[in-house]
Image (cartoon, helix red, strand yellow):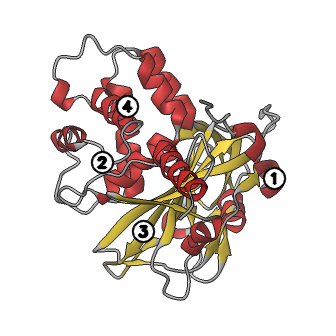
Amino acid sequence: MSHSICRFLSFLSIRDSYFGMRGLSNHQLSCCVNTLLQTFSATWELGEILDKWEGAAVREESRNIPLQLKRVLSAMKSDTSRPAPHRAFLHSLDLNRIRLGTQHDADEVFLSILNLLQHQMDDKHLALEIQNLYKISVETCVQCLDCSSVQTLNTYLLSLPLHVKEDHDSLEGCMTSFFEHQELRGINCCFCAKCEKKTPSKKGVKLLSLPRILSVHLKRFRNSNGYTQKLDCRITFHETIDISETVKEAFSSDFNQNDCKYTLHAVVVHSGYAAFGHYTAYVRHRENQCWYYADDSHVHQASWEEVQSSYGGNHSRGTAYMLMYRRGSKEEVQQPQLSG
C-alpha cells in the first residue's frame, strides 16, 4: 500500500474519531435513557444552557438531575473511543423514581427529565430557558353545540403528541389530524357554564408559538381490551418541514413568528413489542452534519436512507417513535466545521 494511501486512511480514522459520537453502555435496561441522552447531546442548545449554570447551591448531588445531566453531556463531547460514563445519571434518575431495570416509555421519560430540570435548578431564569427551548404554546377552544358559547384555555406542551393511523400515514397527515376540530359527544361531553350541564361540543387547538426545538411524539402504542399493542405502520417524514405550509389552519390570530421551517436532528427508534422492546437513535452531528446511529455503546455513521428505514411497515426492525426538529433550514442550522 502506497504511503499516500496510508496517510489518507489515517486522516479518515482521525476525522471519524474527532467527529464521531460517543456511545453509552447498557446498564440495567438503560437503552431508553441512553437514546434520550443521545438526542439531548445532539440538542447542543440544552448543553449550552446547562454550562451557564453553576449549581453551587446543590446539596444532594446524587439526586440532582440538572447537575448529573450537565456532567454526562460534557463527558459525551470528549474521548469518543470509549462509552461515556453515565451511571451517576442513571442512579440519579432511579432516586427520582425513574427506576433502573424497568422498561420505560421514551416520551414519558423525556417529559419527566424536563420536569425535573425545572424543579431542581436553583437558577429559575436558566430553568425557564430550557422550558422555552421546547415550549409549544397552544390555544384550546371548546364550543358548546347547544348554545354556541366558547371556552378558551391557553396552555403549553413540551412534546407534540400525534395520533397514528393504523394504515400508511405521514408526519404531515398526523399533524393535520391533530389540529382538526373534533366533536365531543356521549361520555366525552364537556361541561358548559352557560347551559350549566355537560353538552356536546366541538374542540379545536391553535398554535400560539413554536419553540426552537420541536419534539414530536408518534403515539404508536394503543390500548385495546386491556392490552397495549404497538402499531408498526409506515409513517413517513422529511429532513425539513415548514409548519406554516403543513398545517395552514393551525395558527391562532395571535401567532406572530415568521420562521416556521424546521430541520430534523434526532430520531428515537423503538424496535420490538409494547411489553418488551429496545430503543436506539439516529442523531445528526453538530460539526460534520452527518447522521449517526447509536445503539447503546455501538455507534456508527449512517445515511439518510438508513434513517428513512425507521418509517415502519413491512415488519421493519425499528420504527420512529419520537422526532426532534430544530427551527431553521438545513443551511441555517449547520455549524461551521473546526479547522486545525
Q: Are marks 3 and 1 in contact (CB under 8 Å)?
A: no
Above or below, 335 against 240 in this view is above
Q: Residues within 10 Å of mark 3 (few under 14, many from 20)?
A: many
Mark 3 and mark 1 lie on one chain; the one further toward the N terminus is: 1
Q: CA distance from mark 3 to mark 4?
A: 26 Å
Q: Is residue 127 visible?
A: no
Instruction: Classify mark 4: helix, strand or loop.
Output: helix
Q: Is residue 80 above or below residue 71?
A: below
The residue type indicated by label 4 comes to Ser
Front: mark 4 or 2: 2
Q: Which residue is mark 2?
A: 82
- Residue position marked by numbered label 1 in the rendering: 249
Camera sees residue 121: yes
**Which amino acid does the dot numbered 3 rest on?**
His
Question: What quarter of the picture does the C terminus occupy?
Answer: top right
The percent position of residue 165, horizontal first and vertical second, equals: 59, 76
Residue 15 drawn at (x, y percent): 53, 46
N-terminal of the pair, mark 4 or mark 2, is 4
